[in-house]
């Protein structure tokens, strides 16, 4: 198992914690000097806050732990490609590298729809590594949404009786 796979596996564990809470299963860990300094998972539904994405939470926790907003040498591992908000937070916090699992065709801003992380007009760019444990990360999401659709369908069927 590669170092990227080891840390992505930790992000996957965070994603599973999100799913246990009924959240979209997205998890993230932030690594500095080969040590996990922060971990987080989606809490949008739990907190009812649109900014409670795994990446935003893990960046905030790391900044608080380190006492700085500059995370230049840190590596972010996240199970789903960052959205525009999260990609912006990566750039603004100066994270050096982002490793993600599944691509996001509807909102991915690390290469799928656009690449905000390597936009030369910004004063910081992050290295991007995509597709690490992509199948497992993608399966977490597709299984979650399949179960959600089934649950909604069953609930709708009960109401129409």
Image (cartoon, rainbow, N blue to C red):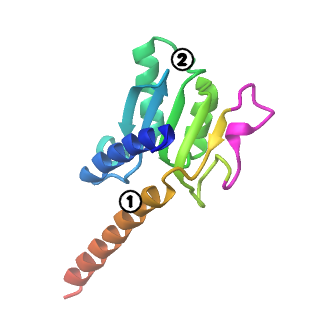
Instruction: Determine if the magenta segment contains residue 32.
Output: no
The local crowd at label 2, few if under 14, some if 14 to 19, many if 20 or more residues have their Cα within 10 Å, is some
Q: Residue furthest front?
A: 1
- Say which label, 1 or 2, has the lower sequence index: 2
Between the C-alphas of marks 1 and 2, the distance is 31 Å
Q: Is residue 2 above or below residue 102?
A: above
The residue segment tinted magenta is: 112-125
Can residue 53 be seen here? The reply is no
The local crowd at label 1, few if under 14, some if 14 to 19, many if 20 or more residues have their Cα within 10 Å, is some
Counting labels gives 2
Measured as percent of width and height from the top left, residue 29 is found at 43, 35
Instruction: Report whether 82 appears left or right of 37.
Output: right
Measured as percent of width and height from the top left, residue 84 is found at 61, 44
- Which residue is nearer to you in this view: 10 or 28? 10
Residue at position x 69%, y 41% from top?
116
Q: Is residue 69 above or below residue 132?
A: above
Q: Helix or strand or loop: what does disc 1 sit on?
A: helix
Instruction: Determine if the magenta segment contains residue 116.
Output: yes
- Which residue is nearer to you in this view: 151 or 139? 139
Residue 140 bears which disc, if any?
Answer: 1
Residue at position x 57%, y 32% from top?
89
Measured as percent of width and height from the top left, residue 161 is found at 19, 88
Q: Main secondary structure of the magenta part?
A: loop
Q: Nearer the viewer, mark 1 or mark 2?
A: 1
Can residue 140 be seen here? The reply is yes
Instruction: Report whether 3 appears left or right of 85.
Output: left
Q: Is residue 103 above or below residue 50?
A: below
Measured as percent of width and height from the top left, residue 139 is found at 41, 63
Quadrant position of the N terminus in the picture: top left
Residue behind mark 2: 69
């Amino acid at each position: 198992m590669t170092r990227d796979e080891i840390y992505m596996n930790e992000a996957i564990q965070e994603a599973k914690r999100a799913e246990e809470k009924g959240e979209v299963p997205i998890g993230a860990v932030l690594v500095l000097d080969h040590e996990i300094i922060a971990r987080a998972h989606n809490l949008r539904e739990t907190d009812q806050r649109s900014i409670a994405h795994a990446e935003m939470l893990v960046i905030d926790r790391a900044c608080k732990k380190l006492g700085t907003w500059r995370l230049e040498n840190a590596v972010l591992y996240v199970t789903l490609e960052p959205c525009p908000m999260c990609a912006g937070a990566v750039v603004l916090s100066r994270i050096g590298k982002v490793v993600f699992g599944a691509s996001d065709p509807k909102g991915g801003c690390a290469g799928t729809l656009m690449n905000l992380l390597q936009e030369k007009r910004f004063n910081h760019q992050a290295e991007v590594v995509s597709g690490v444990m992509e199948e497992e990360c993608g399966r977490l999401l597709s299984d979650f949404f399949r179960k959600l659709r089934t649950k909604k369908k069953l609930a709708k069927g009960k109401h129409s009786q």
